[in-house]
Image: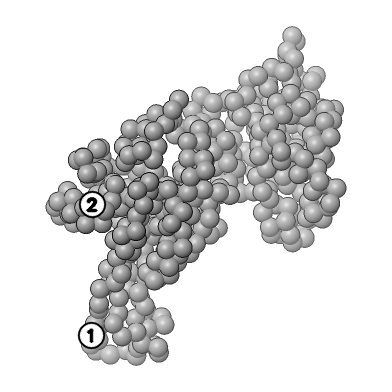
Amino acid sequence: MKYNFLTSPSFFTEDFVKINFNVFKDKNILIGICGSIAAYKILDLVRMLTKEGANLKAVLTQEAKNYIPLYTLAAFTKNKVYTDFSSSLEGEIPHIDLANWADAFLIAPATANTISKIACGIADNLLTNIALVLGKGLIAPAMNTNMYLNPFFQENLKKVSKHFKIIEVQEGKLACGEEGKGKLAKLEQIYWELKSYLLPKPFENKLVLISTGPTKEYIDPIRFISNDSSGKLGYHLAHIFASLGAKVVLVSGVDFKDQIYLSNINFFYTPTTQEMFETLKKHIEKADIFISAAAVSDFKVENFSEKKIKKKKELTLKLKENIDILKTLSKNKKQNQIFVGFSLETNDILKHAQEKLMKKNLDLIIANYYKGMGKDKLYNVIFLSKDGILKEFKEISKENFA
């Protein structure tokens, strides 16, 4: 299927419709589970995926049976659990049948032993046989930090990474009590990596720059002026574009650093308007798409106090106009760039959106009613281009909108 992205703002309303973002519905996902203490966490991942309509089957190594209850796993997947060739039904060729059944193959947690076997082409159990048949999929390692950093293992991991997507381990306190790299990736990261694996990549080799969240304007070193923006919309957009293959730069007034789940999202925390502007300015020239979803402060304090202002009965703040980031950046907009803005209004939503669209040289503006600010939903949403209204929603969640 061809996607006409980057040709007009209609890609947000027409071409996106062609992509099934409910990617897990009716997909067959085969999960391999190895003998790691982290195996118990996979039950929660199974629950996440089945909730979205995925069909799951699980293959366990012999060691994995010591860490996860088979009956519980069977109940969660609503399918037979495979542990070895003898657990197969008569007439089945399990490593071939399961490989042919799977739309996606994930090994999580993957031990050093299993990863090294795959790297060397060893197929001495059902799971490694399937890995050899498929030769692709996703692998989420989990092990002691010394094992993970061992040069022999790193060499094997590098070999495997040429054919399998490696979901990076976390750093932290391990089950053995040691600190370091080796923890199984967060389930949310595994979820997003799996989602990305199943989605098409129409934005491959494209750079999408996104601003999101509120900005702060400090009155003194402690107090500031801001707004109630949650940054959730830009955050969700970043993950969607990244899962569609784009390299994403997310510039945010909310610190999402520990909630970025795809490796092709480059995150910058910029709490003030000036910091956000400077960071966006560094990346705007190479951006194919700029989505300005941030709720930037319109005003800043004229006289910042270097010391904490003491309590008084009255305090008058003199404010002055802040830099209009989107308007400033759009002055140097290239012909092949697409700029998208948002317009949050209390009244005359369409009128104000039309004015901003022209004034800020935008390709698309998304107007919405202010009552969605800081919440999980948007209200009275209008997609507007220079050709007129493209789409409207009375009410939509920010996640579904993205």
What amino acid type is highlighted by mark number 2?
Leu
- Residue sitting farthest toward the front: 335
Mark yes or no: residue 23 visible: yes
> Neighbour class for label 1 at 10 Å: few (<14), some, many (≥20)?
few
**x 84%, y 51%: residue:** 151
Left or right of 119? Residue 375 is: left
Spot occupied by residue 264 in the image (x, y as percentages of width and height)? 55, 49
What amino acid type is highlighted by mark number 1?
Thr
| Up/down of 209 relative to 254, above or below | above
Secondary structure of the residue carrying numbered label 2? helix
Separation of disc 2 and disc 1 at Cα? 35 Å
Do the residues bearing badges 2 and 1 touch, measured as CB atoms within 8 Å?
Answer: no
Residue position marked by numbered label 2 in the rendering? 357
**x 76%, y 44%: residue:** 158
Spot occupied by residue 200 in the image (x, y as percentages of width and height)? 50, 33
* Residue 100 falls in image quadrant: top right
**x 41%, y 82%: residue:** 221
In front of the other: 209 or 70: 209
* Residue 47 falls in image quadrant: top right
Left or right of 96? Residue 147 is: right
* Residue 316 disc label: 1
Secondary structure of the residue carrying numbered label 1? loop
Image quarter where the N terminus lies is top left
- Residue sitting farthest toward the top: 91
Which callout, 2 or 1, points to the residue nearer the camera? 2
| Up/down of 388 relative to 365, above or below | above
